[in-house]
Image (tube, rainbow, N blue to C red):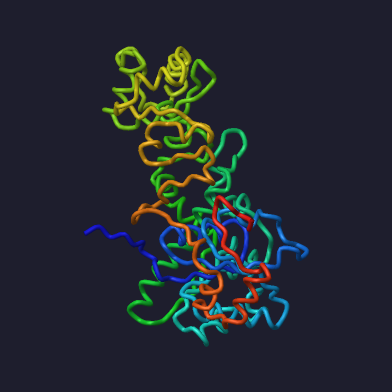
Amino acid sequence: MIDRTLPLDGVKVVELAGIGPAPFASGVLSDLGALVIRIERPSGQAGALGGLERLGVRDALIVELDLKTSEDLVLAREVCAEADVLIEGFRPGVAERLGLGPGELHSRNPGLVYVRITGWGQDGPYSTMAGHDINYIGLSGVLAAIGDELPLPPLNLIGDYAGGALYGVIGALAALLSRSMTGQGRVVDAAMIDGAGALMAPIGALRTLGMWSDDRASNLLDGGAPFYRAYETADARFVAVGALEPPFYAQLLHGLGLDAASLPDRHDRANWPALEAEFAAAFATRTQAEWGTVFDGTDACVTPVLGLGQVAEHPHHVARSVTHDDPALRPGIPAPRTGHGGRSRAEASVSDTLVAAGIQPEQANRLESSGLAYWVDVAHPRPS
């Protein structure tokens, strides 16, 4: 029999609203089946971010609370007392000053998995400083390795989302597994600088072995190798080439119509500029689509570099139900795929969900009727 449930069905996640990695992490947990309750400051309150804080939110029950008032703070504690996971991205000490730190919440809910996602971590001389993705990956050694003349940030994928959000999710899932055996929750310190550094470990190992240079765009995986980089095509588009292994490299040369015997040895880095020139000249003779007819279905590891607006049109994405040209609104099955697909909880009663989350019925009805509690999903980031 096919299992139509998702792995985290029945798990309640509370997010103390933030931007960047915290909503992304709660969105991943929602994709896996968790109920996400996101506590935000009232929308009319000074300092609200006007929608930026919703980036990454996929399916959540928003509860607008002013945590500077005693009444709303009590409500927040009630919700946290019934939660399985709490996610916060404040600077160190802020949650404690609100009375929502792990010490206070574990006294009421010892099984709570308390996930703290910050840039610098909970201690260290930078821990109270402001920062963004570019700062964290800069201090972790990642940024210096990416780019050409200048270090180029790879969007905010490495610090915010991979190093922060996804490591926070890994910590949350591991702690939930531990709790299933011990009954005790844990505090997860997911620092983006730590996560980014961990992602860099294989590259660091290559450097230790003398197989990686600190010079950008001069290595096997950073665009330095002529058989692992992007090339411009005749229509000013690009293809990505990843022909690392000998059989794949042989198929690359075959598709380009180049004779291996006439080319310099690719294992000698001194020959890389000459090889790059050969490949660049060859790829410039056809359009991106024409190269697709040459390399699709082969092991040459040559694929088109698609713009975000082109992704949904590609046959591979069509086959896997990625059907929207806006990545934020794609209704395809979430990653990773662990069940029958995503689902919206917007049809569930707001007040009933709040009561199940620990709020008294009269308070739940007040929050819903006053418009301070409502469902949102990725296609409707603001209530109608």
Is residue 192 shown left or right of residue 248? right
Residue 259 position by quadrant: top left
Q: Report the residue that reaches farthest toward the right.
A: 46
Percent position of residue 181, x then y: 32, 79
- Please say if 196 is above or below 43: above
Which quadrant does the C terminus fall into? bottom right
- Please say if 12 is above or below 242: below
- Residue at image position (34%, 54%) is 340
- Residue at image position (43%, 70%) is 11
Q: Report the residue that reaches farthest toward the bottom.
A: 107
- Please say if 235 is above or below 110: above
Percent position of residue 232, x then y: 50, 21
Residues 15 and 339: in front is: 339
Percent position of residue 372, x then y: 66, 69
Residue 254 position by quadrant: top left
- Please say if 155 is above or below 362: above
In this figure, what is the number of numbered marks? 0
- Residue at image position (64%, 81%) is 99
Percent position of residue 19, x then y: 62, 58
Residues 239 and 26: in front is: 26
Which quadrant does the N terminus fall into? bottom left
- Residue at image position (42%, 55%) is 342
Is residue 45 shown left or right of residue 79? right
Residues 267 and 202: in front is: 202
Is residue 312 shown left or right of residue 297? right
Q: Report the residue that reaches farthest toward the left.
A: 1
